[in-house]
Image (tube, helix red, strand yellow):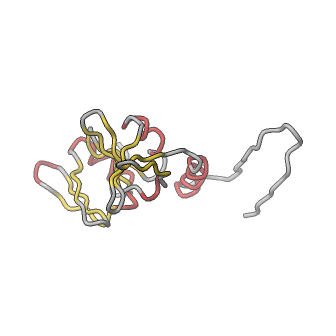
Amino acid sequence: MRIIIETPQPNDEDVVIVRCASPDQRLISMLLSYQTANTELTGYLDDKIVRLNYQDVFYFEANENRVFAYYHSDVYEVKYKLYELEELFMPLDFVRCSKSMIVNMEKIEYLSPLFSGKLEAHLKNGEKVVISRQYVHTLKVRLGIEEVD
């Protein structure tokens, strides 16, 4: 593989062109990560306003018409709707796990089965979140455990 970097003409927009035989998931994730890196994600905790790094978020949860970003030990309110965060971060390593939650797959340590087809995700910060039966297949596909229907 070779990398070519060219300087555009004045007033030209920056453009990234990827020419490859078959883009794999790693390449797509890298490009989407770059594109999403400039996404403003502001968190509110007590009287503090903090710029959040989406890669450090363990999960997002909607509760009583508010959405929260759960970090290792802190919980920040964010001013996005859950569906907006899902659209924004789904191409990366975030996946819907219930009607009210999106989890960062990079923060899952392991999964264990529960009754009635649900899964329990044990996160790297010691928390456990339930993957609803409705979303188990999607998670398994994203993890490469199951084939796409």
**Total number of numbered labels?**
0
Looking at the figure, which quarter contains the N terminus? bottom right
Give the x, y percent position of residue 15: 75, 44
Q: Nearer the viewer, residue 55 or 23?
A: 55
Q: Is residue 10 above or below residue 21?
A: above
Give the camera-side residue of 71 and 5. 71
- Residue 123 coordinates in the image, percent (x, y): 29, 62
Position of 111 relative to 11 (above/below):
below
Image height of 85 relative to 117, above or below? above
Q: Position of residue 141 (x, y in %)?
A: 36, 51
Which residue is rendered at x = 31% and y = 37% of the image? Answer: 66
Residue in the foreground of this view, choosing between 97 and 76: 76
Q: Quadrant of residue 119?
A: bottom left
Does 19 appear above or below 84?
below
Task: Give the residue drawn at x 72%, y 47%.
Answer: 16
Q: Quadrant of the C terminus?
A: top left
Q: Residue at x 49, y 46 (%)?
A: 41
Residue that appears at 45% across and 38% down: 87
| Extreme-front residue of the structure | 47
**Most distant residue in the left direction:** 115
Q: With 36 as the anchor, is 105 left or right in this view?
A: left
Kindly give the residue lying farthest to the right in the view shown.
Answer: 9
Q: Position of residue 76 (x, y in %)?
A: 36, 49
Location of residue 77 (image quadrant): top left
